[in-house]
Structure formats: C-alpha cells, structure tokens
Image (tube, helix red, strand yellow):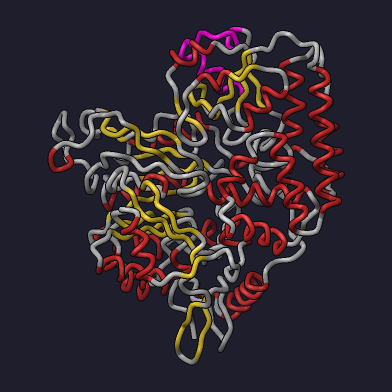
Amino acid sequence: MRCNICERGCLLPEAGTGACGLYSRIGREIVELYPDRYLIICPISIETMPLLHFYPGGKFLQISTAGCNFNCDGCISAAIVKEMDPASRAFHHLSPEQVVDEAVRNDCIGITFLMNDPLASFLTFINVAEAAKARGLLVGCSSNGYFTEASLDKIIKLLDFVNIGVKGMSGEAYSRCGGGTPAPVLRNIERFCQSGVHVEVSCICSKGHNQEILILADYLANISADIPLQVMRFIPVEGAELALEESIRKAEGLRDMLREKLNYVYLFNSPGAEYLNTLCPGCGELILKRDFYGPMGAKLKPAGLGLGEKNCCPRCGRELNIKGFVAKKVYQEGDFQGGYPFTRALEMMEAILIAMGVREQQKVVRIWEDVLCNNNLGRFHDDIRTPRAYIKTIRHFGGLIGLQDKAEALAKYLEEKLLLIESGLRTVDRKPRVYYAMGKPNFCIKGGRLENQLVETAGGTSVNREIDCEGRPGMSITLEQLEALNPEIIFISSFMSSPVDDFYEECLKACLDVEAVKNKRIYNLPAPCWDFGSPRWVLGLMFIANIIHPGIFHFDVLAEAKVFYDKFYGMEFSLSDTNLSFGKPSCSFKWDTQPEMLKKGGETCRQTLSLSPSAL
C-alpha cells in the first residue's frame, strides 16, 4: 500500500514506515505515529511565518511538530526535522480543541503551521484546522507543497492562506530533496489560487541556481502577476557549502529582474536591504514598511501610507493583493519565539555539546528536553549573551549529561583567553568606538548581544549600546544615526554577512561620513559563527582584540583555530569547510548515531525508490 499524503508515494509495509518515518500502515489504514504532539505552540506576528500580504501584523498561533517529508541539504530547520526525536518529552500533548483554546486565549485571529512541514503531521493538522474553522479562526501553513491530489482535496477547503516553498524548477532540484519533479507543487499552486486560498511563494536564492527563480517567476506571472514572491537568500548551514551563499548585492540585482515579471517581490535574509517593503505597483508609493527580523522573517514597522479603502493604494487607488486589515498593534514575540530563531536556539545548545565532543544526537536531545521542559529558553537566551555566563552554561550542560571533565576543559580554555586579554588591557586608557553591523551599514545589532560584549571584552567601546534598538537581532537605523555614532572601527557580523568591498561601496554610495569609512577600518571575521552562537566566539574575540588594539595583541587566529578544532572537535580546521551553522563546526561534520526513527525512515526510503522510481 502506498502512502497518499505526499507525492513521494512511499510503499508502506504492514507496521512499517516510509521516507519520513512518521506514518505507518495498519491493515488498509494509514496512521500517524506521533499525533497531537507539538514542539512549539506560541503566538507570532504573521510576518515571521513569513507571510506579508495576509492580515499584515496579525497575531496568529504558531504550531510546529517534528519531521519532514523532504530531506533538503542545508535545511535551516534541520534541528527539528532531522534531529529532534518526535517521541521526546519536550513535546506538548494537546487535543485539537485545546490548540484552538490556546489561540483564543491569546487573542489570535488564526492558527498557522510552520517551520516543519504539515505534511509530516497531516492528520493532526487536518483535525486542528477543522476545529479552528468551527470556532471562526483563520487557518494556514507553510509547506513544500508536495501534496497529492487526494491530500490536497482534504486540506484545501480548510486553508485561508499558504506559503509554498518551491525548491527549484527542475527534477534535479527536487531529487536533491528526495522528490522527483516540481510538477505536483506547480499543480498545487494553481489549485490553491483557483480555490481562493491566499498564496505566497518562497524560493531559495543561491549561487548558480538563480536561473530557475526567473523561470519560476514566469510561471507565476502566467497565473497572476500579483502573487507575492519571497526570495530567500540562502543561509548555508548543515552540510551546505559556504560558497553557495549569494551576496546581498547580487541578490538585490536578481530581485530587480524578478520585479519586471511580478508586482510583489521581496528579499529576505538580507539585513538592511529595503526589499521587504510593499510598494504600490502602480505609483511606487510605500504602502507597508518592514524590517529584517531574523532568518526567514520580517517585522511590520509603523511607516508607509497603509491600506486605503477596500485595500487599495491611498495615493493612486490601485487595488493591492493584500487580504484583510492591518493590525493596529504588531505583536512582539518573546526570546527565540516566532519562526526560525527557535531553531537557532536549538543549534546554539547543540554547538556547546559538540564542542564537548558529543557525537550522539540523543545526548543533544536530552539537553533540549531539559531546557524546554523546564521553561529555561529565556534564561538560555540571556546566558549566551555574555562570555562569563556562556561559560557557566557550558559547565551546567556538561553536568547534565555526565561530561563534566570535557565541559571543564572547554570552559577553562575560554577562561584562559579571557584572562589573557583582560591582563593585556590593564594599562589601556583609551577604548576606540566600535560599531557592529549585519549585512548592510544601516543594520545595527542590538547592544546587549554577544558581538558587542566581545567588542567591550577586547577593549573597545560598543557604540551599538547608544541606540535604543528593538527588533531581532537588531534593527535598521538611519544614516544620520550612524553618523552621530561616528565609529572608528566597524565589524560586519559573521552571520548573514557581506564582503568588505560590498559593504564599503554601500558606505561610499550613501556618502557615509564616519571615521571607520574614511580610514577604511571595516572588517569581516575570518570565518562564520566566530562572534555568536558557538564556543568559536573565542576565536572571534582574539581577532577583534587584534584589530582594536594592534599594539597589544598579536594572536595568530588561524593557528589558534587549528588548535581549537583539534582539541574540541577532533578534526582539522579548514576555512573552505566552514558554513553558517552554529552547531556544526564544518560542512563535513557527521553524527555517530541517529535516532531510530530517522534510521528506519532512511532505509525504507531507499527500499521504496528501488521498488518503484516512477512513484516519484
């Protein structure tokens, strides 16, 4: 019997599973192995889903489970779709009615399934959607869109909105994820549009694959030029190579080409870029303004004309493809809540454990369970923002999993470097003014984040602290504000970064009058994730100290990296093998073991492919 939930069409043996490892067969019935279990249930603003043209700023209840029907290289949700055991005690057991009660209790106008695919918990989501519709709530999801016609028939009548992530426009793109062809996804996009479901489409922008996005835009334009297209600049995590990351400048150029085909094209994962705003396709007026809000996310800002009567442009009267009203007050998520920052939190915990030598995923899951089950996610968020508290967390995690000796070795290494730098700064009486940006010059990282703590630890004055910074991981500021800060040194975040030459050109184009630009004291760190999210911040600290006080510090940072990788990862350091994963120290990193669910799913998948390739 074949599974009819997604188009992979896995052959399900009696009591066996398919590729995702989440469904089984009992007689002629397909059953969900982990029903009504939620890893995340929390309110969000809809732009963090992300969805931009549906009840802008609206408050929805996010639900997420675990697992996925695809296996995409460089998946930003890998922690919950590949590594989190769906049988873990970290999950909440709630009936559909209890999920809806939670939405109503939090004054949410709807429920949305995101971060992992609803195809991984299809029967659970159907039940929740039915309960939500009965209570008058809006329902939607973010999905790879690989529904079969049978499963689409069941869900389409329950959905008000959907974000479909298109992997590419070729069989090769889908085979890399475990599928076979984009045809089912394109078919389903058309059906959603014909059925009146609000549709937005997202796609990955990576080096060497952008031609497929142009083909996708042509396809969407034939359905409707008003379909919003979300271009996600690729974040190379997990096994994805860093070379696949497209620069913000080139991604902006791609967006301009796409805008010739579609009326609404947005660029994500590009801090400081202006291409998250909604402009009227008729007169070009700013309708809705948004800012970067972490990976794959945006946040509505109080600017722009807003929507006129019947959702038309207040200036020229053109009808805009925006459904619903704009929220009077945009909901502000808590730490690590709302969309993909939650997965970054799991990765940061994983990073500490991997640096202790952990190579078994179940040990990582134990730490995730401890933090999540004891409501310590907020505490973890605070503890990773300062070097000393970070070190305390290392010791705490080591004690929880019985690796006190390895945790102590890592903690002492970090402490020794801190003490060495503190000792070198004892006679320093002047601290240069330092600004930490992300992506573009105008995106200011929050003053309380670890990056700025490293600046101060290395003997600088963090001017970011002089800005009342909201947002996540910061916010866009005006060039006038940046000029008032007048930094002598600028560091560009090593996460979602920009090449120094591109950054410098942006400064010149904006006629930015600050000392750091005049003297071209603008710096990238040598490798990603050396200033946040991983114990590798100690390498970034040494680099920052060299730059701020070159007369005092002369760390051979690359040599230190080789020592660090050998001592704590048991591997050689190579710049070419790094990526943007907080957790994994290299593209080539592998776990020693996998959860049983994932093992079984992989074996079944290989068996299915060999039996019937045509089923894909």
Q: Nearer the viewer, residue 43 or 250?
A: 43
Which residue is drawn at the image coordinates 38% and 68% (left, top)? 98
So how many labels did they put on this image?
0
Q: Which quarter of the figure has residue 535?
A: top right
Q: Position of residue 573 (x, y in %)?
A: 81, 41
Q: Nearer the viewer, residue 202 or 341?
A: 341
Residue 367 on the magenta span: no
Q: Does residue 510 belong to the magenta stretch?
A: yes
**Compared to 323, does 152 lie above or below?**
below
Q: Is residue 154 above or below residue 271?
A: below
Residue at left offset 23%, top offset 29%: 305
- Image point (67%, 38%), residue name: 529
Whole-percent x and y of residue 256? 39, 33
- SS assignment for the magenta stretch, majority: helix
Q: Which residues are magenta?
A: 499-518
Q: Is residue 294 above or below residue 31?
A: above
Which is more toward the observer, 338 or 566?
A: 338
Of all residues, the one furthest to the front in this rendering is: 374
Q: Position of residue 46 (x, y in %)?
A: 36, 48
Residue, x 44% and y 69% (percent of image)?
94
Residue extending furthest toward the bottom: 27
Is residue 284 in sight in this rendering? no
